[in-house]
Structure formats: structure tokens, C-alpha cells
Image (cartoon, rainbow, N blue to C red):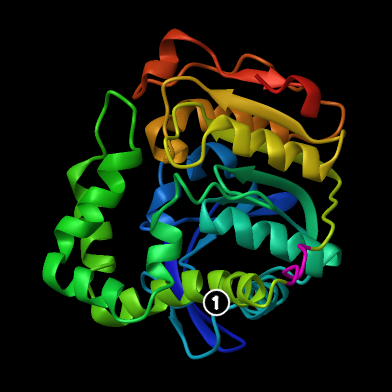
């Protein structure tokens, strides 16, 4: 795996890259509180015959960023990275915040997006009674104080609460994430994501007006991938994403995995994505190889044909 820094627009990305070939490149976007290391076990499987690119998101991990944190601005950074590295369309897989940005990129720049996979990331429906961290992170001062006093323990709590697989996150990556989100500059950037997303909705609520809607998203092929035991974004949220994306979107749920499905069930995820990203004409498997590191090995991932039957 090659790790390098790539300047694009207002960001200097830390970019992990693996693979080569004539297949369409794949862009993998991580969530919070993680970095592109999220994809370390998945990248080798996807890297046969194509380039696989996994950046740290703007301002997070090893990437630096000097702009605004609204989705439109962040999408511009990712579009600039794609244009600099590929100069054409990529297939995109995004988890958590990476999934939200993947949706934003597909809506704003469909010319750059081929296939789209969203993993445990909301679209138009966000259950704030479960995802209580979202309004909290939008508050001034209080989140910074919590991170300053709690440091690594706060990051560890964020990981532990929504991790449901029997096998724990390996210590190397846990330490990386704790360090990445204990740095005050990175904490400020992370909170910028939440504040830019939440405050327009709060303003609209105070004005008793409707918030600006999400753009309509379409892609060549769409998949929603969901850890079935996610306590923050339950399966019903994934089903709502499928409904909003339309009848051509399929859904795969992973039993035994929580919110961090990419790392909780990497073998299942890699197999599902390998099938999803296969050239047209290749069969789409409904029963991917079971994961070795999660209870999902006892029950294969399940595929739903569309909004009406995604369980």
C-alpha cells in the first residue's frame, strides 16, 4: 500500500492507494471517529485490476484543510481529488460521514460518480433520539470541553457504544483513532462537520420554515450496506435511504455487526463490495463469504431487492 500526500483545492489529503489496472478506480470514504485505516482489510480484496483510493477526509486524520465544513464545500474538495488523481468517474463507497459525503458528491457531481455504496450513513432521515451526539456536537463550547477533559476516553466511548461484533477493534487502529481525535485541531475540524450540517436545520426550526432538502441522487448502480445491530442508526434508517434512492437501489444487511460494519465484518463487506463493483454481467451474490472476525460468520449477509423488503 502506498501512502502519500496529495494537494487538491483547499485540502492536502493523506491518501492511501493500492492496486492497478484498467478497471474503474474506487474511492473509499471513512467515517468518524476513524481514518482511512478503516479500509485496511478491504482494500486488498478490491485492488485486483483497479486502483483503490482511500483518503483521510478534509481536516481529519492526516489531511489538512482550510475551508468551510458544509457538505457542499467538502464535496468540492473530494471532487478536486478525483479530478487530480483520476480525471474521470470513480465508484464510491462511503461509511458514516463518508457515506453522507458520497451521497453529496453523487448529487452535486454525477459526472464523477459511477456506482455508489452507502454504509450505515443517513440521507434524509436522522433519528436524533438515538444519534444524540449530533445535536450535542453542534453546540458551542461544550463538546470542546468534553474532548479536552476526556481525551482518548471520549473516542474510545464513541467506538465502544456502537461496536457490536464479538471481536474487538485491534489495538493498533484503536490507538490511531484515539490519537487522531484527541488533537484539538482535529476535534475542531470534526465538530465543524456536525455544526455545518446541524445548524441550518436548527435555524429552520426556529423560523418554523422547512430546511433545504437534499439533492436527488442517482448512479449507475446503488447499494445500501448496513450493520444490522447499529444502535445509533438502526436498520429502519437504512431502509429509508433505500426508499429515498429509489427502487433500483438494493440493500444488504450484515447480522452481528453494529455501526462500524466495515471493521466489524471486513470479510463480509469485502465480498459484498467485490460483487457490487464487478463488471456488468458478473453475478451479484446474495450470500457473501462469512466474516472471520464477527458473528456474521454464522449467518450470511442478506440482500433485499428494494425498499419494500430490505430485511
Q: Residue at x 53, y 36 (%)?
A: 45
Residue 194 visible (yes or no): yes
Residue 52 visible (yes or no): no
Classified by dominant secondary structure, the portion drawn in magenta counts as loop
| Left or right position of 61 against 199 | left
Q: Which residues are magenta?
A: 209-214
| Left or right position of 250 against 203 | right
Where residue 238 sits: x, y (%)?
Answer: 63, 37
Decide: is 27 above or below 195.
above
Where residue 21 sits: x, y (%)?
Answer: 68, 50
Q: Residue at x 48, y 19 (%)?
A: 255
Labels in figure, total: 1
As for residue 210 lying within the magenta part, the answer is yes
> Which quadrant holds the C terminus?
top right
**Outermost top residue:** 298
Where residue 16 sits: x, y (%)?
Answer: 46, 61
As for residue 76 lying within the magenta part, the answer is no
Q: Residue at x 86, y 33 (%)?
A: 280
| Left or right position of 136 against 23 | left
Decide: is 39 above or below 57.
above
* Residue labelled with disc 1: 196
- Quarter-wise, where is residue 186 in the image? bottom left
Where residue 118 sits: x, y (%)?
Answer: 64, 45
Rate crowding at label 1 as few (under 14), some (14 to 19) or many (20 or more) other CA atoms within 10 Å. Answer: some
Instruction: From the viewer's side, name the closer residue of 175 and 150.
Output: 150
| Left or right position of 65 against 215 | left
Q: Residue at x 41, y 21 (%)?
A: 256
Instruction: From the viewer's side, name the closer residue of 41 and 143.
Output: 143
Amino acid at each position: 500500500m502506498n501512502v502519500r500526500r496529495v494537494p487538491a483545492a483547499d485540502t492536502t489529503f493523506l491518501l492511501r492507494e493500492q492496486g492497478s489496472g484498467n478497471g474503474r478506480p474506487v474511492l473509499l470514504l471513512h467515517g468518524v471517529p476513524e481514518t482511512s485505516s478503516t479500509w485496511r482489510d478491504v482494500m486488498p480484496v478490491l485492488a485486483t485490476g483497479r486502483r483503490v483510493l482511500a483518503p483521510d477526509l478534509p481536516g481529519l486524520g492526516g489531511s489538512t484543510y482550510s475551508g468551510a465544513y458544509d457538505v457542499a464545500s467538502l464535496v468540492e474538495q473530494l471532487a478536486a481529488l478525483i479530478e487530480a488523481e483520476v480525471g474521470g468517474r470513480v465508484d464510491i463507497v462511503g461509511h458514516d460521514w463518508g457515506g453522507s459525503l458520497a451521497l453529496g458528491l453523487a448529487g452535486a457531481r454525477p459526472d464523477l460518480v459511477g456506482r455508489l455504496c452507502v454504509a450505515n450513513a443517513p440521507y434524509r432521515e436522522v433519528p436524533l433520539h438515538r444519534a444524540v451526539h449530533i445535536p450535542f456536537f453542534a453546540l458551542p463550547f461544550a463538546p470542546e470541553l468534553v474532548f479536552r477533559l476526556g481525551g482518548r476516553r471520549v473516542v474510545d466511548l464513541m467506538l465502544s457504544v456502537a461496536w457490536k461484533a464479538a471481536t474487538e477493534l485491534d489495538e493498533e487502529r484503536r490507538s490511531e483513532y484515539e490519537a487522531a481525535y484527541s488533537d484539538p485541531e482535529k476535534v475542531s475540524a470534526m465538530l465543524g462537520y456536525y455544526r455545518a450540517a446541524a445548524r441550518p436545520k436548527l435555524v429552520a426550526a426556529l423560523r418554523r420554515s422547512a430546511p433545504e432538502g437534499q439533492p436527488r441522487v442517482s448512479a449507475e448502480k446503488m447499494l445500501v450496506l448496513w450493520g444490522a445491530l447499529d444502535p445509533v442508526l438502526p436498520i429502519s434508517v437504512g431502509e429509508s435511504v433505500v426508499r429515498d434512492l429509489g427502487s433500483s437501489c438494493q440493500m444488504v444487511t450484515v447480522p452481528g455487526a453494529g455501526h462500524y460494519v466495515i471493521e466489524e465484518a471486513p470479510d463480509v463487506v469485502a465480498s459484498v463490495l467485490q460483487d457490487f463493483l464487478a463488471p456488468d454481467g458478473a453475478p451479484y451474490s446474495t450470500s457473501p463469504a462469512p466474516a472471520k472476525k464477527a458473528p456474521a460468520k454464522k449467518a450470511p449477509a442478506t440482500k433485499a431487492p428494494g425498499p419494500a423488503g430490505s430485511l
